[in-house]
């Protein structure tokens, strides 16, 4: 090996069933920094990898509530204090008339929260990832399934992890460097 640091180990699998069973075995063995790379979603794979629920929903809810509060505050300030106008004998701040703008700002900030929250949680944009150096990883978007174990995993040992992935049916198992 060169003087580069190890990123982890990557193994290729032929089918969705094979990667699902491999993921169960890997997590049962005690590995925690494991990820799967598949050409399509594999039902139950996130549970087999023991991945928790995404926090994106909470980000979107918080952004939506912020949009509601900001819209109401903005219209209350503009209509009741900053530029008071009595129209048709109605009070300057009548909350039913603020519902369309409140809805629009809630949707706008929720959309921004979803997009930028997804970028943040996925640590994007990342133009290059070490896993791209694996010889056959380009097939992950075509017809192959890959399982990776990062070197930051507490149980990671390059030789033992490599041998373990080969023993559970991994093909083209290789150490990937940073």
Image (cartoon, helix red, strand yellow):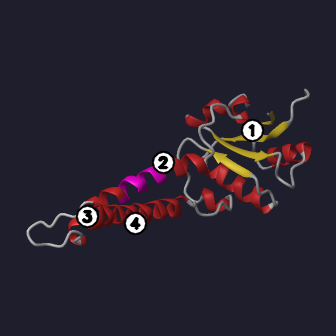
Q: Is residue 97 above or below residue 108?
A: below
Location of mark 3 (residue) = 79
Q: Residues within 10 Å of mark 4 (few under 14, many from 20)?
A: some
Q: Is residue 167 above or below residue 90?
A: above
Location of mark 4 (residue) = 69
Secondary structure at badge 2 equals helix
The CA span between labels 2 and 4 is 20 Å
Q: Residue furthest left?
A: 88
Secondary structure at badge 3 equals helix
Q: Is residue 132 left or right of residue 30?
A: left
Q: Is residue 24 left or right of residue 76?
A: right
Measuring from the top left, give residue 32's x and y in whole percent. Answer: 77, 57
Residue 38 sits inside the magenta stretch: no
- Give whichever of 155, 14 is nearer the camera: 155
> Can you tell which of label 1 and label 3 is closer to the viewer?
3
Location of mark 1 (residue) = 171
Which residue is drawn at the image coordinates 22% and 71% (left, top)? Answer: 94
Report whether residue 56 is seen.
yes
Location of mark 2 (residue) = 115
Mark 1 or 3, nearer chain start = 3
Mark 2 or 1, nearer chain start = 2
The CA span between labels 4 and 1 is 54 Å
Task: Tell me where the magenta segment starts and ends, as one range.
Answer: 106-113
Secondary structure at badge 4 equals helix
């Amino acid at each position: 090996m060169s003087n580069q640091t190890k990123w982890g180990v990557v193994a290729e699998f032929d089918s969705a069933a094979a990667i699902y069973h491999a993921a169960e075995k890997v997590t049962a063995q005690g590995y925690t920094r494991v990820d799967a790379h598949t050409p399509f979603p594999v039902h139950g794979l996130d549970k087999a990898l023991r991945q928790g629920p995404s926090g994106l929903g909470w980000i979107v809810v918080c952004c939506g509530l912020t949009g509601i509060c900001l819209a109401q505050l903005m219209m209350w300030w503009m209509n009741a204090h900053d530029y008071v106008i009595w129209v048709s004998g109605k009070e300057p701040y009548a909350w039913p008339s603020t519902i369309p703008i409140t809805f629009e700002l809630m949707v706008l900030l929720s959309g921004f929260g979803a997009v930028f929250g997804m970028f943040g949680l996925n640590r994007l944009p990342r133009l290059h990832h070490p896993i791209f150096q694996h010889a056959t990883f380009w097939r992950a978007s075509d017809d192959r399934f890959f399982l990776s174990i990062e070197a930051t995993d507490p149980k990671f040992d390059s030789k033992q992890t490599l041998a373990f992935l080969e023993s559970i049916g991994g093909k083209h198992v290789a150490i990937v460097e940073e």
